[in-house]
Amino acid sequence: MAYFKISLFLILGITVCMLLFMIIILKKKNYRRAKYQEWEDRINLAINTAIFSDEEDIINRLISSSIIPQNVISLMRNSTFRKLLTSKIVAASKSLSGNSESNLKKLYVQLGLEQYALLSLKQSLWHIKAKRIQEIGVMGLQSSLNDIKGYLNDKNELIRTEAQVSVIKLTGFSGLNFLDSIHYKISEWNQIILLRELSHLPPEDFHGMNKWLKSDNNSVVAFALKLAGIYHRFAFYNDIEICLYHSDPDIRFQAIQTIAMVYKEKTAALLKGLFPEENQKNKKEIIKALKVIGNEEDIPFLFEIIGNLDNEMKLMVVDTIANISSDGLTDLKKIPEAHEYPLNEMIQQIEYTIKQ
Amino acid sequence: MSWQQLIFNIFTDGILLYSIILLSYYVFIGIFSIGEIRHYLRKNSFTDYRILASSSETPSISIIAPAYNEGANVIENVRSLLSIHYNKLEVLVVNDGSKDDSLEKLIIAYDLIKQPFFVNERVSAKKVLGVYKSQNPVYRKLVVIDKVNGGKADALNAGINISQNDFIVCIDVDCILEQDALLKLAKPFLESTTHRVIAAGGVIRIANGCVIEKGRLIKINLPDKFLPRIQTLEYIRAFLLGRMAWSRLNGLLLISGAFGAFDKEIVINCGGYDHNTVGEDMELVVRMRKYMEERGDPYKVGFIPDPLCWTEAPDTFKILGRQRNRWTRGTIETLKLHRIMFFNPKYSILGLLSYPYWFFFEFLAPIIEFIGFISFILFALLGLTDWVFFLQLLFLILSFGFLYSVFAILMEVLSYNQYKNSKDIFRLVMAALLEPFMFHPFVVWSAIMGNLDLLRNKNTWGEMTRQGFNQPKPKKL
């Protein structure tokens, strides 16, 4: 009985504490929401004015126009205000370029936000550290480059990713050098972020590709293959070709995609040769590649394989035949199977699509 | 000690032990979910999902939305699906032999034309009568499939057969998705470097009371009606606490049929949705997991706490009863189909933890509760009840239930805080107080009826009448 009473009091006590905590949180949130609105209006005005400013001392301009108060530096000690201001400046910088972006960077430095970012870089909480690394990259704080480089191989994936992106922001394509020594796998998500970052830079030559294509880290090889394809690095054709024989089927898959982007005259024959030994997924990719790089000469191969494929691949082959040869479908219709299910329906579908 | 007293003691001690284990589970789930939600929120606090929206490296996704007699709302619902932010997307609307004018309405509204189409029957589905695509390039993502009626699972299978993309997202056509729902749901599939993510789900929220305009959620409100409000609390508890904790353990057995994403290759290898169960959503996830376990491939079923999908909850006891009855039958059918996994170490956490949990605390809980209630009446009539002990125990259980609900509401306030009005939070707390008296007994009763219906071989879906979202003007449901 005593246990029951103790348990009951404990449960009721915790419930009351939770309810009180909830009330405090709600009050605090409501207060902040109202306060934020006031701050947000002021910060938005400051950012808009800074963007179009042609003066070096942006702070003075904002103070003289009473957009920000005289005591802005003391206001900066309020961490909530500072976080809001920083996030607004960083968000605006991400979507701007040229003078406007450079003005925001000046404002950021003149407000002393750089020091706060560097201080919180020493924080032990991973998400704060990652956020600051991102901030440093967006605001282009070159002086912090070496600090960030220390996180390129960090065990926390988010910190690592933000460091990699920031180093690319600060140094361009040469920032990819981290691929030489990265121990961890680069996730698909991470690769998308890196490619997106690189897409903002003017294309230039980058070194290390042959090393990355031979890396022991398969994710580095896959990423290097993507780079070679997107940036049309024809010079690495032979290295890409070697990847077609890689032990990891996912690397071979990527290599098929890439080689179709930097193809040579002999590429189609090479892929046709690999077809019988490949797994289903890679076979599909070879058929897709032939649709792009194939020609009349590949039609006999496609006619040869079509009888032994599953329906999904059969349809892909019909599509490829129709795309690489003007008479392909007419010739296909001459084979007896073309008048039977499923090939007859597939031909009808592809014919209709082409007409459309 | 008399034999009656002995039976009474064994019975009450058994129930007490069961309750202690169940309550311990809730404590564990509550605590375990905190870390997962916090980790997710921190991780995503500065994720820019627009990167995915514009990238050519994103996985291609097919949304499959089965529709049966949805003529009243189908145009707006499809418009809502077409407005979702995602680049490599096709929207497959499967008209499952509707008896109304759904198809005609779609043809006119979206300028559809029937096309010759080879249906690659990779998973079992009834005959496809036609595949329609739009002549208007604005609607190029839309594919409408007209097929012979075969039920939800069959319609989803038909969609799988026709889908062209690598991932499928199965939804109820009348759900309202957040604009960035697919961007958020695609991320778990791209993040893992050690495990293959075979399925992922997100939080489903109750849309009753919200303002919906042209298929879009304009304003979030707590439902005014009592039943949907209680279900709002129930969903917060289940999704924000339960599923987050199970996801952390990689032990999730259920991705809601209202909105879930799947790796199509695995779905096809497993044979697609099972037509013979009314719990096709849970059954598919269990089968996919079983398949991966048997192959020995490392895999994950992901779950994210973002509210991604808004659905209309039943607002009458009649419809709610049908829904809970069906959920019960679906659970039992799935557990029966995959009974080989019960405490089977070959299936690791799936066999040793997830399956036993569902067996003891999802399937058996309402039965034990019901037997407990009947026994209580009997024991009371026989004068065997120790009233002081009983009342203390009852109050303890009720207090714990209330505590767990308050904790869920607190987590909601601390994380997404969808209901910004303090009054709404107060109404949720009140709902938590009333739930054990005005909602829970009915849910238990519906589950008992589900068990009985299953014994009687009744396997109908049960008609789910909904009010619908799309009205000419913005409205409150």
Image (spheres, helix red, strand yellow):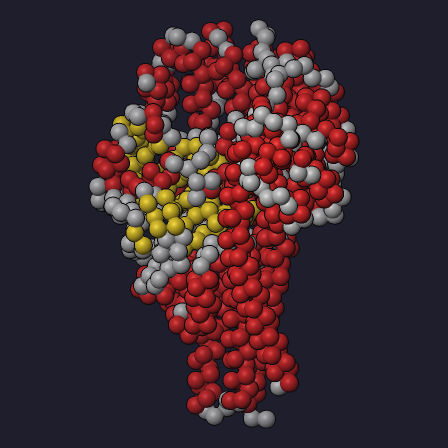
| Residue nearest the viewer, comparing A82 with A202 | A82
Quarter of the image with the C terminus of chain B in it: bottom left
Residue B459 visible in the snapshot = no
Residue B438 image-quadrant placement: bottom left
| Residue nearest the viewer, comparing A329 with B412 | B412
| Residue nearest the viewer, comparing A112 with B430 | A112
Where's residue B188, x and y in %? Answer: 57, 41
Where's residue A208, x and y in %? Answer: 73, 19
Residue A332, placed above or below residue A161 = above
| Residue nearest the viewer, comparing B3 with A96 | A96
Residue at image x 58%, y 11%? A263
Residue at image x 33%, y 45%? B213
Where's residue B227, x and y in %? Answer: 37, 64
Residue B442, placed above or below residue B323 = below
Left or right placement of residue B448 versus residue A236 in this view: left
Residue at image x 34%, y 43%? B215
Left or right placement of residue B440 versus residue B251 in this view: left
Residue B35 visible in the snapshot = yes
Residue A92 image-quadrant placement: top right
Where's residue B89, x and y in %? Answer: 44, 32
Left or right placement of residue A282 versus residue B470 in this view: right
Quarter of the image with the N terminus of chain B in it: bottom right
